[in-house]
Amino acid sequence: MDKDIRETFWKSFQTSPFIMIKLDGAPGHAEPMTAQLDKEAHHAVWFFAKRDNRIAPGGKAMGQVMTKGHDVFACIDGTIVEETDPALRDKHWNNAVEAWFPNGKTDPSVVMLRFDIQDGEVWTADMGIKDVFKLLTGKPIHGQDAGEHALGAV
């Protein structure tokens, strides 16, 4: 994947760290999760969840990201596993997480999950004023005019 698109993805995901995620083959729909991101990590994000959450069993999963400004869209594929490193749990625990899990980080019903990302597909939307005008007036827009697209490791 192009380095610029990868960097754009991670910057946008940092400012809007929400993902719709679902285990492969599991019944039901994807659900929104707040990702805990770490600049030192490569190809991994974390989530806190209740042990009875539909993604808590772990396994192959797919997530969709659409950032706040609708300038980056991504579909990422990987594996969810339980994170057992207490230092990482401490590092990522914060007031926002505490609001969801008021019994604290030692609550045995709360699990920390790591999503190890294998690959992804990322689209960036970067339409100039000319293309916005085309959109508003129904004129044809060519895919390459609307942004960039890349496949591979994120």
Image: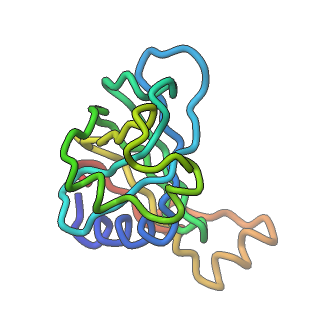
Report the residue at 60% width, 26% height from top.
29
Report the residue at 62% width, 64% height from top.
141
Please, which residue is most extreme toward the right here? Answer: 137
Tell me if residue 26 comes above or below residue 109 in the rendering.
above
Q: Quadrant of residue 113?
A: top left
Which of the two residues, 70 or 131, is positioned nearer the viewer here?
Answer: 70
Name the spot of residue 6 as percent of width and height, x first: 29, 64
Name the spot of residue 31 as percent of width and height, x first: 58, 36
Name the spot of residue 18 as percent of width and height, x first: 52, 55
Name the spot of residue 146 as percent of width and height, x first: 54, 67
Q: From the viewer's perspective, tell me whether residue 27 is left or right of residue 1.
A: right
Which of the two residues, 21 or 77, is positioned nearer the viewer here?
Answer: 21
Q: How many marks?
A: 0
Which of the two residues, 130 or 5, is positioned nearer the viewer here?
Answer: 5
- State the quadrant of the N terminus: bottom left
Q: From the viewer's perspective, tell me whether residue 93 is left or right of residue 6.
A: right
Q: From the viewer's perspective, tell me whether residue 79 is left or right of residue 55.
A: left
Report the residue at 29% width, 42% height from top.
114
- State the quadrant of the C terminus: bottom left
Colour convention:
rainbow
Please, which residue is most extreme toward the bottom here? Answer: 129
